[in-house]
């Protein structure tokens, strides 16, 4: 995890880079400045505060479910839902994420998304 000094944590899993925001302003930066339209974006559902998570997808391929699950587990871990047994995590293409006019840092709207239920986890065997 070589991400010191960056506004996000970096993980690698099955050849994909997973980026996890560190705070509200960092989440905005990650979602709107770092993420590309073809990247996958994840966040815990239900309005629960937490980190924005991005799976880099430079080749615009179908991201394997195992990678989505790992990234979703990280999204759950780096949220207020960390203590829950399972957490609903929304995911979509970064191009489906927008910022409502005048919204505070970290608040976004999703045009369309899917959900996945996962157990919160900070680390995994890569």
Image (cartoon, helix red, strand yellow):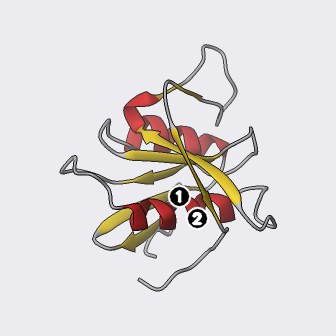
Residue drawn at the location 66% of the way across and 51% of the way down: 88
**Neighbour tally class for label 2: few under 14, some 14-19, many 20 plus, Cα within 10 Å:** many
Q: Which secondary structure lies at badge 1? A: strand
Q: Position of residue 28 (x, y in %)?
A: 55, 38
Can I make out residue 75 in this image? yes
114 or 12: nearer the eye?
Answer: 114
Report the disc number at residue 37: none
Please name the residue shown 27% across and 71% down the image.
Answer: 15
Q: Is residue 34 left or right of residue 20?
A: left
Seen in the picture, residue 86 relative to 31 is either above or below; the reply is below
Q: Give the residue number, with chain letter if any, for mark 1.
A: 20
* Residue named by callout 2: 74
Give the Cα distance between marks 1 and 2. Answer: 8 Å
| Element type where label 2 sits in the image | helix
Q: Nearer the viewer, residue 99 or 45?
A: 45
Image position, residue 13 (x, y; %): 38, 73
In the rendered structure, are the residues bearing label 1 and label 2 in contact, judged by CB atoms less than 8 Å apart? yes
Residue at the top extreme of this rendering: 101
Res 94 quadrant in image: top left
Residue lying furthest bottom: 125
- Is tag 1's residue or tag 2's residue first in the polypeptide sequence? 1
Which residue of the protein is positioned furthest toward the left in this rendering? Answer: 59
In the rendered structure, the answer to whether residue 60 lies left or right of residue 79 reads left
| Location of residue 24 with respect to 66 vertically, above or below | above
């Amino acid at each position: 995890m070589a991400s010191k000094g960056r506004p996000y944590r970096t993980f690698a899993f099955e050849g994909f880079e997973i980026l996890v925001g560190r705070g509200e302003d960092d989440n905005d930066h990650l979602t709107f400045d770092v993420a590309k339209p073809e990247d996958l974006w994840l966040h815990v559902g239900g309005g629960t505060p937490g980190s924005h998570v991005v799976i880099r997808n430079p080749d615009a391929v179908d991201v394997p479910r195992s990678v989505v699950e790992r990234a979703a587990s990280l999204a759950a871990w780096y949220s207020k839902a960390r203590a829950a047994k399972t957490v609903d995590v929304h995911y979509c293409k970064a191009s489906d994420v927008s910022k409502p006019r005048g919204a505070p840092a970290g608040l976004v709207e999703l045009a369309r998304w899917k959900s996945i239920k996962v157990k919160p986890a900070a680390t995994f065997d890569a």
